[in-house]
Image: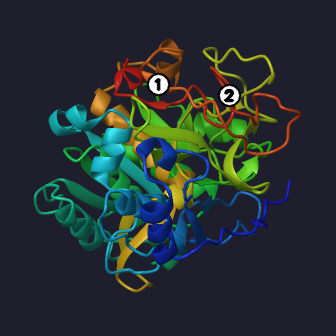
Amino acid sequence: MPPRRHRGRRRTGAGIVGVAALVFAGLGTAAQADAATSPTPHVTWKRACSAPAKAGEMACGAKRVTGGTTAYALQRAKAGHAAPDAADASTPSGYGPADLQAAYGLTSAAAANGTGETIAVVDAYDDPNAEADLAKYRSNYGLSACTTANGCFKKVSQTGSTTSLPRADSGWAEEISLDLDMASAVCPKCSILLVEAKSATMANLGTAVNRAVTLGAKYVSNSYGGSESSSDSSYDSSYFNHPGVAITVSAGDEGYGAEYPAASRYVTAVGGTALTKATSTTRGWTESVWRTSSTEGTGSGCSAYDTKPTWQTDTGCAKRTIADVAAVADPATGVSVYDSYGITAGWYTFGGTSASSPIIAAVYALGGTPSSGSYPAKFPYTVAGTSALNDVTSGNNGSCSGSYLCTATTGYDGPTGWGTPQGVSGFTG
């Protein structure tokens, strides 16, 4: 099967001056501000990594916002503060740690949990500025230092070497910055292990996953994907069958349709949402399926090759269904990231399910070490339909005759699985 290509149109939108005018002149109350007539975030963005060039190659999914008005900017404007322009790298224009922790009921857990836990981030190629950029992010948001010197941060190649690293790549460096910052945002007390594969092939990335587990990580985030193939079952057994380890994988960013390794039965496939602050709701936030166009949005669907895990009981797919859970991914409601390699050093907003995968890996870390022999992908299913997860019931990521496979509904659906975290109880076991 040839690799799927990025074909969709990008968002465009008004500047922040117009947004502020709408907020302050026309929309008055909180209920009105939450209504459909209120200003909505609109951004343009650029894909960090090119599409896979051949079978067996993966692409990172990071989406860097290049202009427009983010949800965070609207949030600032509604509160009467200066609203940052997404194109201004001098100041954050996306959600930060406090926003993400509040949105997912993690504020208390993030303050108390995570010490002694290691989140591994698996990516291709080297980011020479990874540690320095991470330091900028953590310092800006008041998080404790996470460095090689204090033992919190470690960067290795897929062989485990700290000195013989892959060649640098600016696109994957953006992905690395996104992943490290999201792990930090949700689990600031966790240690972080960055494992860099020597190329973006599934074989090398899979070897990096194995290395992460060998080095003791119990939570491994993978923000990349590509076309399914008949080799996937062998990849499953070679790289992703690690009982007692929570392995998260981005569901993809090209709308309805399955990708690998999100289709692996051994991983937690993470879909994506649009996340916005909503003062008219008890939770204080609302979410819908992330969809920009028919070819841009969270992935979901039926695997053509992977066996359905025993804990997955939906009837619309004979094989593995994507996704299991979800978190914020829409670039217009994106997250703040600091990056400097191959780009103007500064603050950027990022989206894509590349953001949601490390967020969910960090939620697992807050929940504590998975029990020996367990498959953590099962954990959310044990609390399905309870307050442990925020059920996402609006939006779709494509056309599938209204089926739950691409349309949000009460309970399980393809784009968001059983929902987004509300605390850690759905990610322990």
Q: Label 2 sits on what residue type? A: Asp
Counting labels gives 2
The quarter of the displayed image where residue 50 is located: bottom right
**Residue position for label 2:** 413
Answer left or right for 194 relative to 415: left
Q: Nearer the viewer, residue 18 or 267?
A: 18
**Residue position for label 1:** 389
Residue 9 picture location, percent across and down: 75, 69
Specify which label sits upstream in the sequence, 2 or 1: 1
| Mark 1 crowdedness (10 Å alpha carbons): few <14, some 14-19, many ≥20 | many
Residue 408 picture location, percent across and down: 68, 32
Q: Label 1 sits on what residue type? A: Leu
Q: From what the image shows, is residue 20 above or below residue 40?
A: below
Q: Secondary structure at mark 1?
A: strand
Residue 147 picture location, percent across and down: 17, 62
Residue at the location (64% across, 23% down)? 412
